């Protein structure tokens, strides 16, 4: 797997998350607030092997902008979770 990229740049309202899977598998990519709440589920389903891009626009599951602060993106695929910290600056 390719690690998720570093923090969201303040000038960019969209984070592009790139990762690679060695084989087809079920995958979940979710955004968690600093207190551990899931604020957005970006993907939840079966993915083919290979490289993937997923975009996060800084919004929660109901479409509202998340508050500025620290967020953790967690990819669970093939039994090995991968996390990456993001900072939202407005």
Image (cartoon, rainbow, N blue to C red):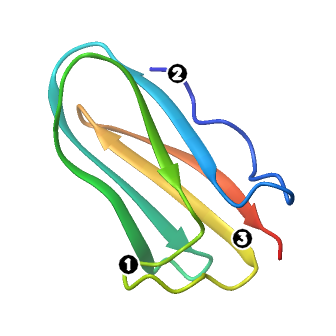
Compared with residue 39, is residue 5 higher up or lower down, i.e. above or below? above
Image quadrant in which you'd find residue 66: bottom right
**How far across and down, in percent of the image, does residue 54 sit?**
44, 43
Q: Earlier in the sequence, mark 3 or mark 2?
A: 2
Q: Earlier in the sequence, mark 1 or mark 2?
A: 2
Tell me the quadrant of the picture where the C terminus can be found. bottom right
55 with respect to 67 (left or right): left
Q: Residue at x 73, y 41 (%)?
A: 6
Please name the residue that numbered disc 2 is placed on.
2
In the picture, the disc for residue 3 is none
Q: Would you call the spot at circle 2 few (<14 residues within 10 Å), some (14-19), or many (20 or more)? A: few
Q: Secondary structure at mark 3?
A: strand
Compared with residue 7, is residue 77 higher up or lower down, i.e. above or below? above
Q: Secondary structure at mark 1?
A: loop
Which of pointers 1 and 2 indicates the residue nearer the eye?
A: 1
Mark pair 3, 2: CA separation: 22 Å
Cβ atoms at labels 1 and 2 below 8 Å apart: no
Seen from the viewer's position, the closer of residues 55 and 30 is 55
Q: Secondary structure at mark 2?
A: loop
Please name the residue that numbered disc 3 is placed on.
70
Q: Would you call the spot at circle 1 few (<14 residues within 10 Å), some (14-19), or many (20 or more)? A: few
Q: Would you call the spot at circle 3 few (<14 residues within 10 Å), some (14-19), or many (20 or more)? A: some
Q: Residue at x 29, y 13 (%)?
A: 22
86 with respect to 58 (left or right): right
Mark pair 1, 3: CA separation: 17 Å
**How far across and down, in percent of the image, does residue 2 sit?**
52, 21
**How far across and down, in percent of the image, does residue 75 sit?**
40, 45
**How far across and down, in percent of the image, does residue 15 sit?**
63, 50
Please name the residue that numbered disc 1 is placed on.
61
Image quadrant in which you'd find residue 71: bottom right
């Amino acid at each position: 797997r390719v690690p998720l990229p570093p923090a969201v740049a303040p000038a960019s309202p969209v984070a592009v998350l790139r990762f690679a899977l060695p084989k087809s598998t079920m995958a979940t990519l979710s955004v968690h607030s600093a207190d551990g709440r899931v604020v957005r589920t970006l993907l939840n389903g079966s993915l083919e092997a290979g490289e993937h891009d997923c975009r996060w626009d800084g919004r929660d599951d109901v479409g509202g902008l998340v508050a500025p602060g620290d967020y953790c993106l967690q990819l669970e695929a093939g039994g090995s979770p991968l996390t990456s910290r993001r900072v939202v600056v407005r």
